[in-house]
Image (tube, rainbow, N blue to C red):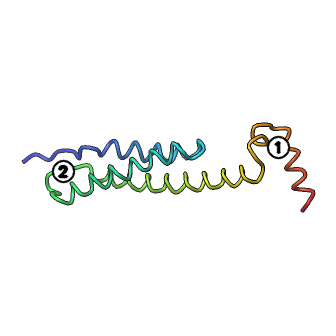
């Protein structure tokens, strides 16, 4: 019997790559892409384990799955950092560069 490619192997790989790239955009795209990569990666791993002789492409699935996990972790860290920064300075400071520089100078002088 001819081996067939795992149905979502390319999708998992692409979503894993996008999750790492997407973590730089305030974390939310990376989190979404990473969760998709993990879910579809688990699904394909389960399918491969049920009949390994029938499917190929497990390398793409494993790589995308690992990148999805890394992307989720980086996205969560970025979101936490952004929320801490937001709570320290407020939204108006983040949107106004002059006010941000003023607050950073005040913070630097207080130390």
Q: Quadrant of the C terminus?
A: bottom right
Residue that appears at 14% across and 47% down: 3
- Crowd tier of the residue under label 1, counting other residues whose Cα lies within 10 Å: few below 14, some 14–19, many 20 or above: some
Report how far apart the C-alphas of labels 1 and 2 lie in the structure.
55 Å
Q: Left or right: where does residue 100 sit relative to residue 85?
A: right
Q: Tell me residue 29's x, y (percent).
A: 51, 42
Instruction: Please identify, in this view, whether the residue under mark 1 or under mark 2 is nearer the observer.
Output: 1
Most extreme residue toward the bottom, as rendered?
111
Most extreme residue toward the right, as rendered?
109
Residue that appears at 32% across and 49% down: 40
Q: Tell me residue 88's x, y (percent).
A: 76, 54
Q: Is residue 109 above or below residue 27?
A: below
Which label sits on residue 33? none
Say whether marks 1 and 2 touch (CB < 8 Å): no
Residue that appears at 28% across and 44% down: 8
Q: Left or right: where does residue 6 sit relative to residue 2?
A: right
Q: Which residue is mark 1?
A: 100
Q: Earlier in the sequence, mark 1 or mark 2?
A: 2
Q: Which residue is mark 2?
A: 55
Residue that appears at 31% across and 53% down: 59
Q: Secondary structure at mark 2?
A: strand
Q: Tell me residue 20's x, y (percent).
A: 50, 48
């Amino acid at each position: 019997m001819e081996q067939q490619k795992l149905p979502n192997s390319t999708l998992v790989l692409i979503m894993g790559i996008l999750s790492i790239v997407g973590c730089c955009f305030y974390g939310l795209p990376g989190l979404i892409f990473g969760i998709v990569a993990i879910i579809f990666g688990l699904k394909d791993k389960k399918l491969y384990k049920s009949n390994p002789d029938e499917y190929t492409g497990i390398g793409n699935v494993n790589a995308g799955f690992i990148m999805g996990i890394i992307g989720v972790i980086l996205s969560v860290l970025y979101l936490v950092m952004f929320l801490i920064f937001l709570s320290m300075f407020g939204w108006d400071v983040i949107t106004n560069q002059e006010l941000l520089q003023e607050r950073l100078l005040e913070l630097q002088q207080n130390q």
